[in-house]
Image (cartoon, rainbow, N blue to C red):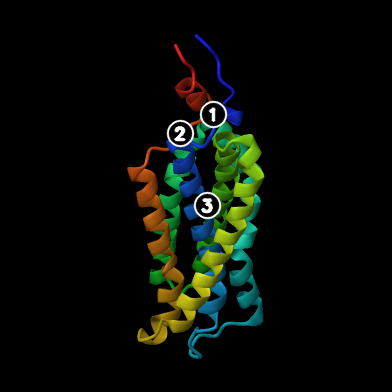
Amino acid sequence: MKSADYRNAPMEKMSWNVFIGVVLGQIVSSYTLGIVGVALDRVPSSMTLSSTWLGLLGAGSLIGLFGSLLVGCLADRYGRRKFFMADMLALTLLSVLQLFTTNLAALLVIRIALGMAIAVEYTVGTALLMEWVPAKRYFRYQTYLLAYWAIGYFAAYLVGTFTTGFGDRTWQVILASSAIVSALAGLQRLVVRQPECSSTRVTTLVGL
């Protein structure tokens, strides 16, 4: 048996699968974060929305991002692939829930929960990328993620700006639109096999 240094190996199919999965996760994350600002501008005047609630709802997902302090430990203990797979399901379901509530306290809880799900994306996705992208290309591909993050944020602005025709519920439809992008990303993770950890790749690169 001969060993192989997977960190210096070229990009292979599994590496591309991980990269695409992480890219889609970045787009979903930035879209989910960005859509709230546009949606809150469309809240009907019949709803009393104070500046305090505007601030809380706008920052809800950012508050949830503090969950990243816990996510890393849990993912290491229970398996990164499980978190990576379940995360998009959580983002999809939570996004849909925004369509069915006008209760501000409930909506704040949902936004915080979305932020915690995004924390999984940032923590687990970055760890997988570091493990599966060759060392000499890691920083380049990490830079690419910033561009894809911006694409998701810009897409949220466009969708929020041009979504009309739902009356007083337009703002809720805009918020819930993040379910579409997260469902698509989740489908990719269901169809394309994602690895658990770098040891899997080491096995695939060991010659007998």
Q: Quadrant of residue 52?
A: bottom right
Q: CA distance from mark 2 to mark 1?
A: 8 Å
Q: Judge whether 48 appears above or below 83 on screen.
A: below
Q: x and y percent of residue 147 in the render?
A: 59, 60
* Residue type at numbered disc 1: Ser
Residue located at (49% from left, 27% from top): 201
Q: x and y percent of residue 171 in the render?
A: 45, 79
Task: State the residue lying farthest toward the front.
Answer: 10
Mark 3, mark 1: which one is toward the viewer?
A: 1
* Residue type at numbered disc 2: Pro
Is there a contact, CB below 8 Å, between mark 2 and mark 1? yes
Work out whether residue 116 or residue 178 is closer to the camera in this orientation and state it.
Answer: 178
Which of pointers 3 and 2 lies earlier in the amino acid sequence? 3
Q: Residues within 10 Å of mark 2 (few under 14, many from 20)?
A: some
At mark 1, the secondary structure is helix
Q: State how many labels appear.
A: 3
Q: CA distance from mark 3 to mark 1?
A: 23 Å
Q: Is residue 105 left or right of residue 97?
A: right
Would you name the residue on which mark 1 appears?
198
At mark 3, the secondary structure is helix
Task: State the residue lying farthest toward the left.
Answer: 191
Would you name the residue on which mark 2 appears?
195
Would you name the residue on which mark 3 appears?
117
Q: Residues within 10 Å of mark 1 (few under 14, many from 20)?
A: some
Q: Residues within 10 Å of mark 3 (few under 14, many from 20)?
A: many
Which of pointers 3 and 1 lies earlier in the amino acid sequence? 3
Q: CA distance from mark 3 to mark 2?
A: 20 Å
Q: Quadrant of residue 51?
A: bottom right
Is there a contact, CB below 8 Å, between mark 3 and mark 2? no
Q: x and y percent of residue 173 in the render?
A: 40, 75
